[in-house]
Amino acid sequence: MGSEQMLIDNNPFEFQMKIREAIPGLQLGMIPLFHYNKTGWILGCKTLEICKDFLQNKNRTKLIAALEALNTQAAEIWYNYVVPQVPHDTTGVLTPLSNEIIREEIKVQTGEEPTQYRISKYGVNPFIRRANWIISKTFPAF
């Protein structure tokens, strides 16, 4: 049975068996969590060392080949926060602040490069010429 059919059948145990066969020394108890979500499959490891071992290049290529996958990636934790009442333009100039200026200010204030930043869906308040910004940053899950 091919990996595509296993995806349709939603059969995680067969995937775990393929992974165990592909990576020598791996036991099923080391990968107790393997389930499908909307973006793909989640492989949960028993310990942090096992997860890091999966991401090493030699095991990563074996994992991709065994599952006939396109890619693997490490889990990320997203932090989103709102910066309220950011001026939309500078005093005396009705030109909106550029995204580059906003990005630089975020970097100066936090000391880190943002993963994503955008104006909120409500846009600019036309009376006070200010807007809320949504700032996102990702960190590795381990």
Image (cartoon, rainbow, N blue to C red):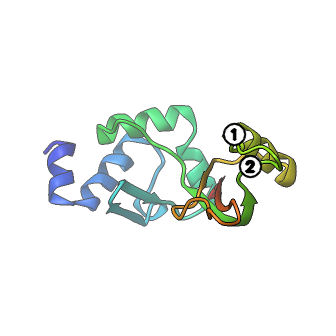
Q: Mark 2 against mark 1, which lies toward the viewer?
A: 2
Quadrant of the frame with the N terminus: top left
- Is 118 in front, or is 110? 118
Instruction: Name which quarter of the figure residue 131 lies in.
Output: bottom right
> Taking 142 as reference, is 115 above or below it?
above
Earlier-in-chain disc, 2 versus 1:
2
Would residue 101 be found to the left or right of residue 8 on screen?
Answer: right
Q: In the rendering, at what x and y percent does residue 56 appear?
A: 58, 38
Q: Secondary structure at mark 2?
A: loop
In the picture of the structure, the residue carrying the numbered disc 1 is 98
Give the structural element (helix, strand or loop) at label 1: loop
Q: Which mark is residue 139?
A: none
Q: Between marks 2 and 1, how big is the CA–CA gap?
A: 9 Å
Residue for point 83% across, 50% down: 91
Q: Looking at the picture, tell me which residue is in the foreground, 123 or 8.
A: 123
Q: The residue under label 2 is which amino acid type?
A: Asp
Give residue 97's quadrant in the image.
Answer: top right
Q: Amino acid at mark 1?
A: Ser
Seen from the viewer's position, the closer of residues 133 and 48 is: 133
127 relative to 113, above or below = below
Q: Identify the residue at horizontal 64%, vertical 63% (top origin).
A: 79
The number of discs equals 2
Residue annotated with mark 2: 89
Q: Are marks 2 and 1 in contact (CB under 8 Å)?
A: no
Could you tell me which residue is drawn at 35 percent across and 35 percent down?
70
Q: Quadrant of residue 28?
A: bottom left
Disc 1 crowd rating (10 Å Cα; few below 14, some 14-19, many 20+) is few
